[in-house]
Image: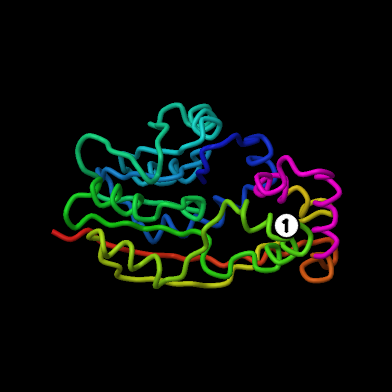
Amino acid sequence: MSAGSHWDVGRYEGNHSYVWELGADLVDLLAPRSGERILDIGCGTGHLTSKIAARGAQVLGIDSSPDMIGQARQNYPALQFALADAANFSFPGQFDAAFSNAALHWVEDAAGVAQSVARALRPGGRFVAEFGGHGNIRHILEAMRDVLGPTAGERCPWFFRSIGEYSTVLEKHGLEVRQAWLFDRPTPVDGENAMKDWLEMFAGKIFDGLPATQQKMDEVVARLRPKIFSAGVWTLDYRRLRLVAVRGA
């Protein structure tokens, strides 16, 4: 994940481990091979970077959050991590593959991402990514709009694009999309306070500076309860966009 702002990495590591755990099969799709040079974009605290390295690849993890990079270096001191913007990065040499999990919906400049990835990859190099897609967290966004009005949209930090939208941008910059999926991934999180914790962790920018912040969060939670809460479990209405692309010659 990458948003370029402050992150509570302790909370992220403790309560939101599903972010990287659900990305484990994306590493299988990447199929890293021994000796390959691979870039992990929006690496967060480094857990999937480590899984890629365990396959024998030489991997560099990048993220725009100093908090995330600092924690990644503590978690995996033997691996390489760098502070970098997903929409504007450049490193010496070329990579065999680029990988990204649960990060690119935080990046408005999709064209910058595509340009940077294409520049980083060798001809024939692959790009495997998954992030929030069109329709992601629909119920949550509706509840925030109901409570906050236009402010919710104006402050929204996410960009949930369709297959067509993102594929068009990638192909414009020399990345041929070979496979793409848009799919529902209902994600359960346990505990009475899990929804408010999610809002505080991921949607803080929307509520920052507003009067009666905690009250407004509580109102959002109350509106969501009949829709996505049952038997002590909140089920986040995630939708994911997964893409495999290859850089042309």
Towards the viewer: 40 or 119? 119
Is 219 one of the magenta-colored residues?
yes
Towards the viewer: 30 or 177? 177
Q: Residue at x 24, y 43 (%)?
A: 35
Q: Residue at x 39, y 65 (%)?
A: 166
The colour scheme of the drawn protein is rainbow
Q: Which residue is mark 1?
A: 189
Q: Residue at x 65, y 48 (%)?
A: 202
Residue 75 image position (x, y, % from top left): 53, 31
- Quadrant where the C terminus sits is bottom left
Residue 118 image position (x, y, % from top left): 25, 52
Residue 183 image position (x, y, % from top left): 52, 72
Answer with left or right where residue 134 lies relative to residue 49: right
Above-or-below relation of 136 to 192: below
Identity of the residue furthest to the front in this view:
150
Answer with left or right where residue 233 lies relative to residue 116: right
Identity of the residue furthest to the left in this view:
249
Residue 234 image position (x, y, % from top left): 76, 62
Q: Amino acid at mark 1?
A: Val
Residue extent of the magenta highlight:
198-223
Identify the image quadrant of residue 238.
bottom right
Identify the image quadrant of residue 244.
bottom left
- Magenta: main secondary structure: helix
Badge 1 element: strand
Give the crowd class for mark 1: few <14, some 14-19, many >=20 residues within 10 Å: some
Towards the viewer: 85 or 240? 85
Is 72 one of the magenta-colored residues?
no
Identify the image quadrant of residue 91.
top left
Callout count: 1
